[in-house]
Image (cartoon, rainbow, N blue to C red):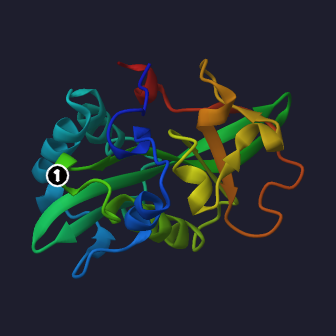
Amino acid sequence: MYTAYANDKDRQLTQDDEKLSYMKTPEGLIIRPELPGDYAAITHLIHAAYGRSNEGNLVEDLRHNPQFISGFSLVAVLHKLIVGHLLLFPVFVRNAGLVFRSLALSPFSVLPEFQRNGVGAALVVSALDEAKSGKFGSVVAWGSRNYYPALGFVPASHYHIYPPFEVPGHVFFAVELFAGGLKDVSGKIEFPPEFFAF
């Protein structure tokens, strides 16, 4: 099973100046949807960020899934270099006979030398803004409890939403894309099969 604990989401932020630094956006940073010409660079940066090939391969595989939304695969570009990437992918929340739509924020990568300087936060904020234009009410993510709450996420258990794999409750998060986006929504997240291929 693919897990998303590698790169800047894992960092432990304990001092106020560190928290401020990762929320500031670097001057000249551009967030935009990926283009076909970006694919090789995206795979390279994901490999570099995670130190393994799983997540890069996952993104490549998900592009072939009919549920893939090209506008939800974003890159961060700084001085013409792709330094970050974030994918929002459609998932379901299932509870008995009820099915709800959501988005999974994963994978999420920043080149090691550009971590902790605002690139990741800018990607998340831009991705959430972009997702508000779609037909989704929420986004789920998993990673550091010192990172996602500062970006508006709360533990998904608050909404009685749980992952299909074992992770501590304090590292699995959800955020509403609009007020009431998770009203009456609860259950277990259902990921596409590509997430379980590693």
Which residue occupies the foreground of this view, 129 or 119? 119
Please state which of residues 15 and 97 is positioned toward the viewer in this rendering. Answer: 15
Q: In the image, 45: left or right of 32?
A: left
Q: Residue at x 67, y 56 (%)?
A: 175
Horizontally, residue 56 falls left or right of residue 193, namely left
Q: Residue at x 31, y 47 (%)?
A: 109
Q: Give the image quarter of residue 31.
A: bottom left
Residues packed near mark 1 inside 10 Å, few (<14), some (14 to 19) or many (20 plus): few
* Residue position for label 1: 113
Q: Position of residue 118 (x, y in %)?
A: 35, 65
The quadrant holding residue 51 is top left
- The amino acid type of the residue labelled 1 equals Glu
Residue 11 appears left or right of 151: left
* Quadrant of image for the C terminus: top left
Picture residue at 26% right of the left edge, 34% below the top: 50
Mark 1 lies on a secondary structure that is helix
Give how far across and how far down residue 45 sits, in percent: 17, 46
Residue 43 image offset from top left, x and y in percent: 17, 43
Residue 168 lies in quadrant: top right
Residue positioned 41% across, 32% down in the render: 5
Name the outermost residue toward the right: 184
In this rendering, the answer to whether 194 lies above or below 139 is above
